[in-house]
Image (cartoon, rainbow, N blue to C red):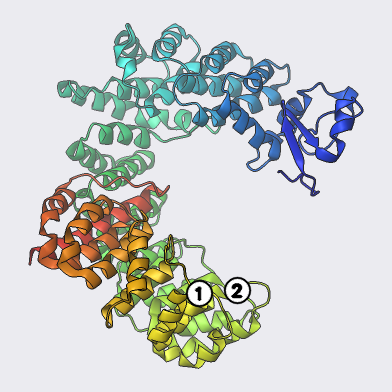
Amino acid sequence: MLLVPGGRWPISLRAGTFVRQDQAHDVQEGRLAPLSVNRLVPAASLDSWGWLEAGVVSGDLLVPGDHARSWVFDTIKAERDGLATHRLVTLATDGRVPVRRAVFTLLAELCSLCPGGWPVVAAAAESALRDGDVPVRRAAAALLVRTGEPDRVVAVLAASSDPVVRLPLMHAMSRRKVAGYHAVAGYRATLDRLRSDSEPAVRLLAGVAAYRSDDPASWPALDAAIRADAEASADALAEPGSSCPERPGEVWARALTGLDRERDCCAWAHRLTEPGERPQLRLDGIRIAVAAMRTWRAAPGRLTPMLTGIVGEHPSEVRSAALRALAASLTASRLGADSLAAVVDDPEVGAAAATGLGCVGDHRAVPYLVRLMLAGSPEPRLAEAFRAVARAGADPQAPVAAARRMLAAVPDSCAPELPMRVLAAFGPGAAAAVPELIARLEGAENDTPDWAFHVLGTIGPAAAAAVPHLQQYPTQGATSALFKIISDCAVAERYLAGRPEELRRDRLAAQLLTWLAEHGGLTARQHRQLRSLFKVPGFAQVESAGALWLQEGPAVAHELLAVLPQYLSDDLHGPKALLALTAMGSHARPVLDQLDRIITSPRRAEFNIGDEDSEMRADEMLLAATITARERIAG
């Protein structure tokens, strides 16, 4: 069932139409047309697919969450060469430029549903390479690369005399890891010709494409040519109409990291950032440095001295970029902590410097983090920085006072996230905020005060005044907080008794079972609950592993060793798995070889967080945890 925007009508989807179920008969009789994108329209105004054209014209089909868009995606996923695809392809030749642009944008988004070749769309894209509109030609070129077979793409590239087409073709090809291009007859000859193209950006992309892992002798000449064209290519590669704007340094770095050229990548970062180079080239050097640090674990050590040197220069765009690169990596931030501390007062880069410094637990950041919090700074890692300084033993007085001040400024029914996160970070050190947290429990209106529960639980026994209020809430969050405050086995036993014997995903149950296993052991039923959690892959398995070891001891070692190693390269589950293995001590020694492989890998682990800097930091934290676990297991 779908809900029409502005109404609550159940919708029936059939044969490409949107039909209100209470008006289906009128549609069948022709008195109403299918529901268009957001409304019912007179039958005479649109054919049975008119809603599709209307959605393209209005732009609604480009809006995530639109019902018609969802239907199009679902339909093409089920039948990629069906009527919906053919209708879109037909609109690709519409006489209206905005319609053609919208169609190619939508087709590009639909490509994720159809990996590999998509001949119907590739043919439409190739035809549009002669379109009179430049953005349409650019979009069509990029779409052809995504949907066409390598031989078709190479043939079009070789025959193209239009620089507007050649550039997006080459750019899209450079972003796709398609080994098949090199196997196409004439591809190498085409690249050699394009390396002398009149357009610098085409020459640069052709040089990048010409890199081959089996021909390292050719790399220096290609490097020099790319370096020569880098500055002149910047505007064309970052063209706002491009399907994926980039800077020359980003394109070059992708090639260097793809070939695993760590030393060369770091060396070019140093060379391009020399003080005598032009600002745009220096920025490209920093972009290459960022890519290197995201790819190789040793890169921060090689590049931090260069970055700290730039941070010490006069204010400029280059200096700001260097500081952001330094603060993005935990390793680089530790190595360059003094340079970050020297600029925390800077109006331009101080926020990033303080956050980077705080994220490695440096107490010098605390007053500046407090200032940023009170000023409503949008720094996305501010809560992370407070957690790090709290773990490092920073004085909680100023952060807790600031958080209380922010809570006092809003109604008791509100629980602003940042001050709550700060209080949770300091745990028992935030005991002074218990009155404000109790007020959140008393002032809750529509939503359960989950943040207040969480913070009270982290404060622990010092939040005893909140116990009567927590007892009024029959929720999992309140039970968790209550238990953490009073550590009463009766609370744990009562909760577990109310849960089924066969548990699936219950993080509180895992925590309570672990505590009970540490404090006298489990009953037979609780043991069965624990065993049921351990059978569920993911959080339930890793969070119950420690309790299983406490309950059963060495007898369960073989089961734990069969399961836990699969999580060691997982940013979410890895830390918990490492804790369980560490608790096993010498019984976990069979996993040492795997830990050694993880520790000695020169490249970072590949995560799917969605942000490359977050993935880099996740690798840095997991690596540190792995090293610690290895040392304790080895004894």
| Number of residues whose C-alpha sits closer than 10 Å to that of mark 1, classed few (under 14), some (14–19) or many (20 or more) | some
Q: Is residue 59 left or right of residue 574?
A: right
Task: Return the residue found at the far left.
Answer: 635
Q: Camera-side residue: 603 or 39?
A: 39
Residue 364 visible to the viewer? no
Residue 202 falls in which quadrant of the image? Answer: top left
Residue 629 falls in which quadrant of the image? Answer: bottom left
Task: Return the residue found at the far right.
Answer: 31
Residue at the spot x=33%, y=6% of the render?
186
Label 1 to label 2: alpha-carbon separation: 9 Å
Q: Which residue is mark 2?
A: 448
Q: Quadrant of the N terminus?
A: top right
Q: Which residue is mark 1?
A: 477
On the image, the x and y values in percent for residue 237 come to: 45, 30
Q: Is residue 440 left or right of residue 154?
A: right
On the image, the x and y values in percent for residue 624 come to: 22, 61
Residue at the spot x=23%, y=61% of the render?
578
Q: Camera-side residue: 392 or 412?
A: 412
Sequence order check: which comes first, mark 1 or mark 2?
2
The correct choice, above or below, for 259 with respect to 148 in the image is below
Q: Amino acid at mark 1?
A: Gly
The reply to whether discs 1 and 2 touch (Cβ–Cβ < 8 Å) is yes
Q: Amino acid at mark 2?
A: Thr
On the image, the x and y values in percent for residue 557 come to: 17, 61
Helix, strand or loop for disc 2: loop
Q: Camera-side residue: 146 or 509?
A: 509
Residue at the spot x=11%, y=55% of the render?
590
On the image, the x and y values in percent for residue 223 come to: 25, 27
